[in-house]
Image (cartoon, rainbow, N blue to C red):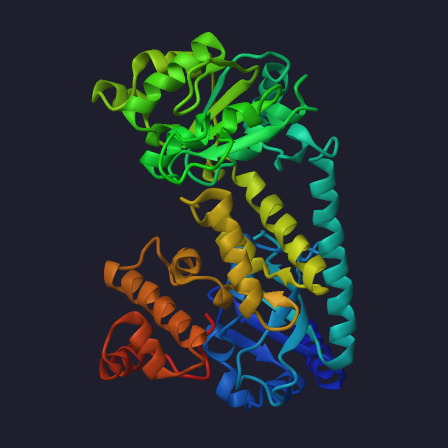
């Protein structure tokens, strides 16, 4: 008996006697070995599984990621809570198992394939709880390490060097009374930065008053900012009403979306900043105010000045200090810190212990987040509301977020354009079905297509109503 034959017999005997499941794939993800216990769990015959791509047997498999990242199973790196789609296991109650995954290499370091050791039933749930607790503790520690206090700039989450420098600059500027103009894309935290400037300034005990210039009709914005005297216009309150400038006295006035302020009102705002006093609508006497003004906009004020839509003198009065917020895509290391912090808040609110799958973490890191942190929170809230039990998987994400990962799994570097489009379309259809309770009619209505067309697409893309998670 050769040594290779001897080890093969030992391996087969071990695979047969253990209560756990084992599966082995080659470097392309094709199943080469699986023990009977795992076949029983999957309610599949061994001869129907061997030689098949693992993704066709377990649609939620993470083994492609294991191969791509060459996981060696060191520490907890290879441990994963494996979800299964409806109909993929012998018992609907057994929709999870715990997988210890690792790659197999030759003596020369060549990748040969990968294997997974699966734990089922209550032992899996016990192990899953341990993994969940470990995951939650890890990201809680990461979040706590990114905080140096309980307010001000320490409340701005992130560890990216660019963000840390921005916070350092903000803390320094906060000690002055200079006006600050905060620019940046939507969802980058402009108001949060303005609040931090106030809370770390000498005016922190005074009021912080915020006004969104885009949310108030032009004909009301003047009275909202400067207030009005009794009888100033029909319907004016008896005794008049103070404006935001007066309410912010001895504190900070935050003018959000300053680029949406109409030109005539820009003149009055400029005068108030120059003279440190305001006049109410219908009033006669000027009222002195002691405030610091912080403005913010998502618009390009330089272009607006050239077009005559924003006053140049007001711009230079507001932008004594100019702060540009950093988009989330430019600090990718902070994406999971934000994501896990928000998930932690949801877990605390709803008394759950949900975590992200490895696949979801990759999706979140690879997506460009045009809506920044606000969009990230929206996506996580939707996934949290629709996920199953303890794990948010890629099927719980919108197609626009998960499709990049799906295309990579199908070989996007060498794939034809038609293959990439099919992958993206498949993700959209699966999401529509999932969000509409597997109803083809409702999904078709939601996507604005005929039901017969959706059936044709499902047939072409190989989508069944039992397997809509990718």
Give coordinates of residue 396: x percent, y percent. Answer: 50, 66
Camera sees residue 203 = yes
Whether 191 is drawn above or below 90: the answer is above
Give coordinates of residue 337: x percent, y percent. Answer: 62, 44
Q: Which residue does the image show at 72% across and 58% down from the upper left?
A: 348
Give coordinates of residue 66: x percent, y percent. Answer: 56, 60
Whether 114 is drawn above or below 250: the answer is below
Tell me: 223 left or right of 347. Answer: left
Tell me: 261 left or right of 373. Answer: left
Give coordinates of residue 210: x percent, y percent. Answer: 52, 33
Q: Which residue does the image show at 38% across and 33% down from the upper left?
A: 221
Q: Residue furthest top?
A: 275
State the residue in front, 217 or 186.
217
Tell me: 462 left or right of 294. Answer: left
Image quarter of the N terminus: bottom right
State the residue in front, 416 or 299.
299
Where residue 437 sits, quadrant-wise, is bottom left
State the residue in front, 163 or 235.
235
Whether 62 is drawn above or below 291: the answer is below
Tell me: 236 left or right of 264. Answer: right
């Amino acid at each position: 008996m050769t040594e290779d034959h001897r080890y093969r017999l030992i391996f087969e005997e071990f695979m047969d006697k253990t209560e756990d499941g084992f599966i082995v794939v080659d470097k392309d993800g094709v199943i080469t070995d699986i023990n009977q216990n795992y076949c029983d769990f999957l309610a599949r015959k061994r001869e129907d599984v061997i030689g098949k791509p693992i993704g066709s047997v377990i649609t939620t498999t993470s083994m492609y990621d294991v191969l791509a990242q060459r996981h060696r199973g060191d520490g907890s790196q290879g441990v994963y809570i494996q979800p299964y789609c409806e109909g993929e296991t012998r018992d609907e109650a057994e929709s999870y198992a715990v997988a210890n995954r690792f790659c197999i290499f030759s003596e020369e370091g060549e990748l040969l394939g990968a294997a997974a050791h699966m734990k089922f039933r209550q032992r899996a749930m016990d192990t899953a709880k341990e993994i969940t607790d470990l995951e939650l503790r890890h990201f809680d520690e990461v979040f706590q390490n990114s905080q140096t206090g309980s307010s001000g700039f320490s409340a701005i989450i992130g560890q990216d060097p660019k963000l840390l420098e921005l916070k350092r600059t903000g803390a320094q500027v906060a000690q002055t009374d200079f006006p600050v103009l905060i620019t940046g894309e939507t969802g980058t935290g402009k108001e949060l930065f303005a609040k931090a400037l106030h809370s770390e300034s000498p005016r922190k005990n005074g009021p912080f008053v915020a006004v969104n210039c885009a949310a108030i009709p032009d004909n009301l914005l003047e009275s909202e900012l400067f207030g009005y005297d009794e009888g100033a216009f029909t319907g004016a309150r008896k005794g008049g009403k103070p404006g935001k400038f007066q309410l912010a006295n001895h504190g900070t006035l935050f003018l959000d979306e300053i680029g949406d302020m109409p030109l005539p009102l820009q003149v009055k705002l400029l005068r108030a900043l120059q003279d440190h006093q305001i006049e109410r609508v219908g009033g006669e006497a000027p009222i002195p105010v002691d405030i610091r003004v912080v403005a913010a906009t998502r618009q390009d004020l330089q272009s607006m000045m050239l077009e005559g839509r924003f006053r140049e003198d007001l711009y230079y009065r507001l932008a004594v200090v100019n702060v540009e917020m950093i988009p989330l895509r430019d600090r990718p290391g902070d994406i999971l810190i934000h994501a896990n912090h928000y998930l932690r808040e949801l877990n605390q609110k709803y008394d759950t212990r949900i975590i992200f799958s490895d696949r979801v973490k990759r999706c979140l890191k690879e997506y460009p987040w045009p809506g920044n942190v606000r969009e990230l929170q929206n996506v996580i809230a939707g996934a949290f509301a629709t996920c199953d039990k303890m794990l948010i998987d890629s099927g719980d994400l919108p197609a626009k977020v998960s499709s990049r990962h799906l295309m990579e799994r199908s070989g996007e570097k060498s794939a034809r354009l038609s293959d990439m489009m099919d992958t993206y379309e498949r993700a959209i259809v699966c999401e529509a079905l999932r969000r509409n309770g597997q109803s083809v009619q409702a999904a078709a209505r939601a996507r604005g297509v005929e039901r017969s067309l959706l059936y044709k697409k499902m047939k072409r893309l190989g989508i069944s109503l039992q397997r809509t998670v990718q």
